[in-house]
Amino acid sequence: MGKLGVITNPRSQKNKQGLEKLTATLEAMPEARQVVLEAMTDIPAILADFARQEVDTVAVAGGDGTVQAVLTALFDERPYDDPPRLAVLPCGMTNMIAGDVGLRGSLRGGLEKLGSLLRTGGPDAIAGATVTRQILRLENARGKGPQYGMFFGGAAIYRAIIACRAKVHPYRIKADTAAAVTLAGILAGWLLRGGETAGPAGEPARKVFSGDKIDVTFDNQPVEHLTSLIILATTLDRLILGSRPFWNGGDGQMRFTSIAYPPDRLLRYAWRVLYGGEDRRLPESSYLSRGANRVSLAMNCPFTLDGELFEPEPGQPIILAASDQARFLRI
């Protein structure tokens, strides 16, 4: 029987409604131990304690930001000789990681299936339920040590998150719906107001659609000078709304995409960018996507890593690599 440790963030959106159902389900699982976070800074000590107790599966009941904090503690501080299996429960406002590698179904159903697998599944069943993903390592976030996660976004992605939190999240609608509403609003702003999206009450309008100058170096290739509307890098297979806005992956461990500013016929190509196949027949002057093992980004714009917001260290490039790998239980 495997040992299960559950890290629960009570401030994640779904958990704010109460932890009674989650706690009741876990109490019926003798192999499980739940720790409810008081602060995100407690995660390294919790994982170190799990390692001492030989907990081999760590479940995270939170959103993308909680998962990002767990990944950073696991891969930066290395409390385990070998990283434990991870199980992600979609409890946040944004659950993009859970959508790709998390437990399926309801919270209670997912936990019950996880407990049954760990109790009676055996090595072959556990291996069959395991998916692996590379983990992004990000260096030179201002005032921070190395950060680990699975989705990096900059330029308009950062500004869209700010707009979504100000205008959509207060209505407490589902994450995928919030993403769709935000995307529709941004595209409408681009079409009707040149990309200007209204800010919160009493604040000036924000220019979500604008360009950021970014110098990018892929692996050991020559530097490329971009003016980007959007940049993203990810090790996930699918993003929000099941989209796959990356192509020409090659052998790289991460996928990188940039959309230039101003974009060439963005509305016409939007569906192809999000859901097209490997050959998307997009204008190369506006739409860049490729695989890479290491990406260096000299830029001044803020960015997000799994929904958490950061700024670049002045004078230092953002460095992205993906040499570490995590195992996720997907049942």
Image (cartoon, rainbow, N blue to C red):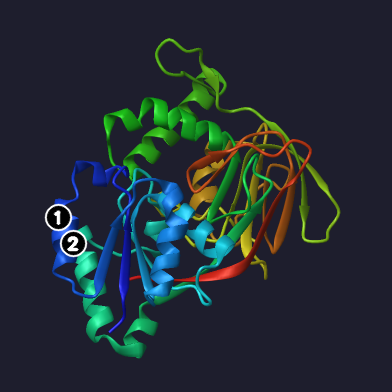
Q: In this view, does 199 lie to the left or right of 260?
A: left
Give the residue at x 38% y 25%. Answer: 167
Q: In which quarter of the image is residue 156?
A: top right
Q: Residues within 10 Å of mark 1 (few under 14, many from 20)?
A: few
* Front position in the image: 296 or 192: 296
Q: How crowded is mark 2: few (under 14 residues within 10 Å), some or many (20 or more)?
A: some
Q: In which quarter of the image is residue 195?
A: top right
Q: Which residue lies furthest to the top in this view?
A: 202
* Front position in the image: 124 or 254: 124
User: Of the residues under marks 2 and 1, which one precedes in the sequence?
Assistant: 1
Q: Do the residues labelled 2 and 1 touch (CB within 8 Å)?
A: yes
**Residue type marked 1:** Lys
Residue 112 is situated, as x and y percent measured from the top left of the image, at: 19, 70
Residue 184 is situated, as x and y percent measured from the top left of the image, at: 42, 33
Q: Which residue lies furthest to the right in this view?
A: 222
Give the residue at x 35% y 45%. Answer: 176
